[in-house]
Amino acid sequence: MFHAPVSSRIPGGSDLSLLLDQLSHCCSRPRYAFMLLTLIADVARPDGSAGPMVRVGKALVPLRDWLCDALTPMGHRDPRRMALVERVREELRKEERLTGDAAADEALVQDEVRTRVRASGKTNLSRAASELVKAGLLKRHYQGYRVDHLNRGAQRQAVYTLTGRARVLVGAPRQTATPPARPRQGDLFAA
């Protein structure tokens, strides 16, 4: 089946509609990829780059951890997630790490589930990022302790930069300086 380019199917196809069309053709999970690009754009600097750390309250969190945590609620109703919660609860019970205090036990279960979901989320994130890099929508490099480098490791953290059509997601630069007030009579002589 022949598909006409979006710009010819949608009159006056916007940059965003072109981005969505590109994602639908280059990504195995286009909705997930779009959410990922949108989250990166939310914390990106005016040049489109985000990371290696994101400020959360007063703490700094690695970008990949923040992205995984931000995407985690999308799967809270997934039967696999619910099964994971029960599996973790049973494992903690067998290891006798549960105290009998319902609130403390639930917090322990949720912390362990969060750790496991974050680990699997990083795999999903890396897969989606690789597809976006191949599509020319994202650049990825690693920054860290000693030297910026293309390969991860040695205390380096990911930095993602929106490129190509994904740049449409980066908002206009924020105005940092206030415009000068219009001079009033007497301002020239004030000490």
Image: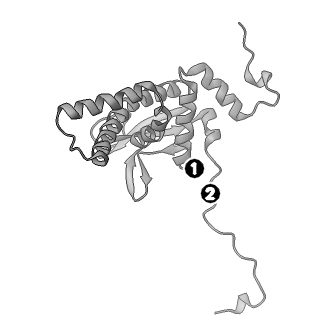
Q: Secondary structure at mark 1?
A: loop
Q: Classify 10 Å Cα crowding around label 1: few (below 14), some (14-19), many (20 and above).
A: some
Q: Which quadrant of the view contains residue 126?
A: top left
Q: Residue at x 54, y 30 (%)?
A: 33
Q: Is residue 189 left or right of residue 53?
A: right
Q: Which numbered marker is on residue 46? A: 1
| Marks 2 & 1, CB-CB < 8 Å contact | yes
Q: Is residue 107 left or right of residue 186?
A: left
Q: Which quadrant of the view contains residue 27?
A: top right
Quadrant where the image shows the C terminus:
bottom right
Q: Which numbered marker is on residue 91? A: none
Q: Between 60 and 73, which is closer to the camera in this rendering? A: 73
Indicate the position of residue 7 as horizontal and vertical percent values: 76, 25
Quadrant where the image shows the N terminus:
top right
Indicate the position of residue 150 as horizontal and vertical percent values: 38, 34
Indicate the position of residue 13 as horizontal and vertical percent values: 77, 30
Residue designated by label 2: 174
Indicate the position of residue 81 as horizontal and vertical percent values: 40, 29
Amino acid type, residue under disc 2 in the picture: Arg
